[in-house]
Amino acid sequence: ETGVTQSPTHLIKTRGQQVTLRCSSQSGHNTVSWYQQALGQGPQFIFQYYREEENGRGNFPPRFSGLQFPNYSSELNVNALELDDSALYLCASSLDLAGPYEQYFGPGTRLTVT
Amino acid sequence: GEDVEQSLFLSVREGDSSVINCTYTDSSSTYLYWYKQEPGAGLQLLTYIFSNMDMKQDQRLTVLLNKKDKHLSLRIADTQTGDSAIYFCAESSGGYQKVTFGTGTKLQVIP
């Protein structure tokens, strides 16, 4: 059983550009959540996908969007990057929606916007 | 809205017990969690407690929940240098897996 992986590890983008971050969930996990963790802060919930449909969203603007694929992979897309988007982006996979929500986190992608 | 607060820093000597505290505001919280984050790594779920429980013990970890005061604590017995990390308190409620995290407590273990 493989863990949750994310790519790339680090990324530097310019303000106004677009970025796609990728996540490979643990095998069999049909739910993936994405979080933004600014330096010195706790992770903030961006959105969640369940069986390829968005199932919930935090306080993030529409320029943050996602996709989930049948092969347990998913993407986080951010358009019109702003300096404040610089953060560690974490994905977490879990099995189904029933609690407790035992989420397995990937190591994250560190995004720097200049 | 939901809010989870923690103290920022805790320093303990190796072999002592560590107690990390957390308060939350959402009275509808169903599950409360403790996560550990080591440098350069993602978050690792340490333990969780259902909101109708007062205590849960798991090896060196003891979780205490005071639902009336919305206070959660994590006690680590016989703290080791490998326990040095940032510890996040988190809560979830509602029909989907939105987990609200605190700002984290950095635990420093002094040899």
Image (cartoon, coloured by chain):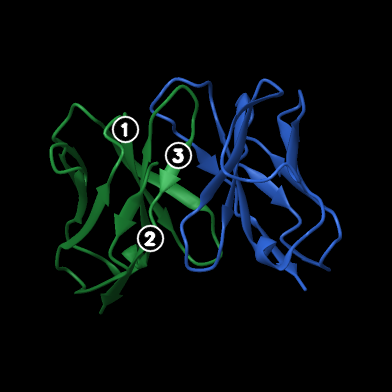
Chain colours: A blue, B green
Looking at the rendered structure, the secondary structure element under dot 1 is loop
In percent of width and height, residue A43 lies at 51, 52
Q: Reply above or below: A84 against A99.
A: below
Looking at the rendered structure, the secondary structure element under dot 2 is loop
Q: Nearer the viewer, residue A85 or A50?
A: A85
Name the residue type under label 2: Gly
- Which class describes the residues within 10 Å of circle 2: few (<14), some (14-19), or many (20+)? many
Chain under callout 2: B
N-term-proximal mark, 1 vs 2: 1
Tell me the residue at 24%/30% (across/down). B51
In percent of width and height, residue A51 lies at 67, 20
Residue B104 bears which disc, if any?
A: 2
Locate the N terminus of chain A by quadrant. top right
Q: Label 1 to label 2, Cα distance in Å? A: 18 Å
Q: Reply above or below: A30 against A112.
A: above
Query: Does residue B75 show up?
Result: yes
N-term-proximal mark, 1 vs 3: 1
Label 3 and label 2 in one chain: yes
